[in-house]
Amino acid sequence: MSGTPTTGVPGSAIGDGIVEKRDLLSIADIAGDLPDVVGRVEELKRARPEGVLPRTLPDCNVAMVFEKPSPRTRSSFETPIQELGGHPACLSTSEMQLGRGETIADMARVLSRYYHGIVSRAYRWQNEAELARPSSVPVVNALDDREQPCQVVADLLTLRERWSRCFRGRRLAWVGDSNNVPRSRMLGCAAVGLDPAAAIPEEYRPPDELTAPARRLGESTGSNLRFVADPREVVRGADAVYTDGGVSMVEEAETAQRTRAYHGYTVNDSLLDLARLGAFALHDLPAHRGLEITNSVMDGTRQATGDQAENRLHTQRALLELLLAPRGPGLPGSTPRSG
Ligand code: CP
């Protein structure tokens, strides 16, 4: 688990005990809790339409710091924070002083005095770590260049829902890049014992230092990480096929090279036909139609992208509860850490 012990609830009138600050920077930080977290997400999802959502974060103030745009992640945090009884405050880079020389650490110490938790989307994972280290309140990674843990919790729920609540015997095929979502996915699959098989061009596969934690986690759950070059090999017989940008979202200079490397990696109907009957495509969105996935698949019945997006909302609620509720709302105004 990432994070350091702090005395009491930050800035809290209740601060009379030792409370472990718990960050979620990598999905590995909640690997042991993942089955319970996904179960809680399911409970909360059921409770919402019934109008019986518990107000488990009364008067919790949560800062949402976004270095990059994010319609889905921002909305899927903002709404649950309010529904759980808390108050979200969104801070984009243009509203901060980081560009004018303020350090991330200084900002973290100040935000810790105002808020009970920080949700952060950053360009680099080092920025998330720099934010979390001096912060005395939990920091949640809402995407950086290394991981997107919240997305993958929602994806595991989507798979469970579609697979009669059981991962056993199921096969998830990944077709595409090895950037942030796939890295969290490797770890998430390893934590729940799901075999992730990935088709990624050799030159774009993650280095051993990034796959080692997933392989270690997989040893205890029986999950076996495998890379191949041919998308047809992983899709054949799979129960779901996940993709996101292999060509999109890269520097323009790299586009031509990637377009060549990713030739044949588009998830289209004929690729999906190789999967098992009832198999479906997944994409964390935004989708780059015509590049990693076709219009026909995106607009057809063999996809679960709407469920994935909706499940972000239910997931954030459970994650916020897990990290913030044990610390209680307290009152902002002091900090147990130096500075
Ligand atoms: N999937 C995802 O994180 O979407 P946003 O960039 O819209 O938040």
Image: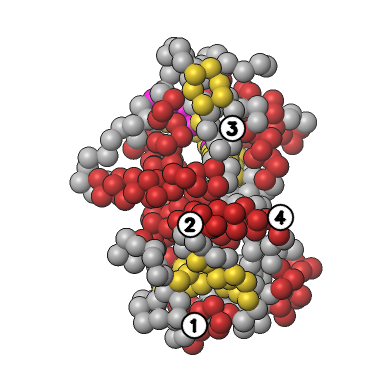
Check contact, mark 1 vs mark 3: CB within 8 A.
Answer: no
Q: Looking at the image, which residue is at 42% across and 74% down?
A: 239
Q: Residue drawn at (54%, 78%), measured in percent from left and top?
A: 234
Give the spatial CA distance, label 4 vs label 2: 20 Å
Query: Considering only order in the chain, which callout, 3 or 4, is on the residue closer to the N terminus?
Result: 3
User: Is any atom of residue 261 visible in this view?
Assistant: yes
Circle nearer the N terminus (1, 3): 3
In the displayed orientation, state which residue is furthest to the left.
50
> What SS does tag 2 mark?
helix
Q: Amino acid at mark 4?
A: Glu
Left or right? Give the position of 250 relative to 164. Answer: right
Determine which of the numbered discs, if any, sits on residue 3 in the image.
Answer: 3
Identify the residue at horizontal 38%, vertical 56% (top origin).
157
Distance between mark 1 and mark 4 Cα atoms:
29 Å
Q: Type of residue at label 1?
A: Arg
Dot 2 alpha-carbon crowd within 10 angstroms: few under 14, some 14 to 19, many 20 or more: some
Residue 143 located left or right of residue 15: right
* Residue type beneath disc 2: Thr
Mark closest to the chain's N terminus, 1 or 4: 4
Q: Earlier in the sequence, mark 4 or mark 2?
A: 4
Q: Which residue is mark 4?
A: 209
**Boundaries of the magenta span:** 59-64
